[in-house]
């Protein structure tokens, strides 16, 4: 995947979030939070990380098995739990535990 492909994919995701009435800075933040959750899990599974940095219940597969309002509510709670993490790095990455998403379908995409 080239840098242009990555940029295009990011903008496509931004278009999805724009439909939820979110401004660009908020959806870049939203995408970074989601991307970190996804990459942390994938890197641990690939053996690039020795152990999960995110607590159980706050990992990528915990989101993928849900849909609709259940997914959105779970994601909101996950962000609150990450703020309370005893790992200072995780708590620093998630200092403002709220999502600007209002439509569960946008989180599913």
Image (tube, rainbow, N blue to C red):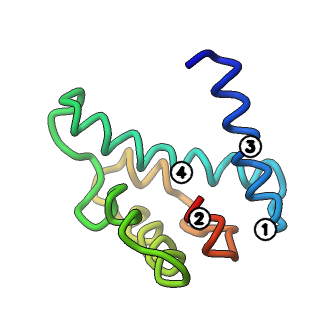
Q: Earlier in the sequence, mark 2 or mark 3?
A: 3
Disc 2 + disc 4, Cβ < 8 Å: no
- Identify residue for label 3: 12
- Identify residue for label 1: 20
The image shows residue 56 at horizontal and vertical percentages of: 23, 63
- Identify residue for label 2: 107
Mark 1, Cα crowd under 10 Å, few <14 / some 14-19 / many 20+, is: some
- Identify residue for label 4: 33
Front: mark 3 or 1: 3
Residue 24 drawn above or below residue 44:
below
Dot 4: element = helix
Q: Earlier in the sequence, mark 3 or mark 1?
A: 3
Apparent side of residue 89 relative to residue 56 in the rendered image (left or right): right
Front: mark 4 or 3: 3
Mark 3, Cα crowd under 10 Å, few <14 / some 14-19 / many 20+, is: few
Q: Earlier in the sequence, mark 2 or mark 4?
A: 4
């Amino acid at each position: 995947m080239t840098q242009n492909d990555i940029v295009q994919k990011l903008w496509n995701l931004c278009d999805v979030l724009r439909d939820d009435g979110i401004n660009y800075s908020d959806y870049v933040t939203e995408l970074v939070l989601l991307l970190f959750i996804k990459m942390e899990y994938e890197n641990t599974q690939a053996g690039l990380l020795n152990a999960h940095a995110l607590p159980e219940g706050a990992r990528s597969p915990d989101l993928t098995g849900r849909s609709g309002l259940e997914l959105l509510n779970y994601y909101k709670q996950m962000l609150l739990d990450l703020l309370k993490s005893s790992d200072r790095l995780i708590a620093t990455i998630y200092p403002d535990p709220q999502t600007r998403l209002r439509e569960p379908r946008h989180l599913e995409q």
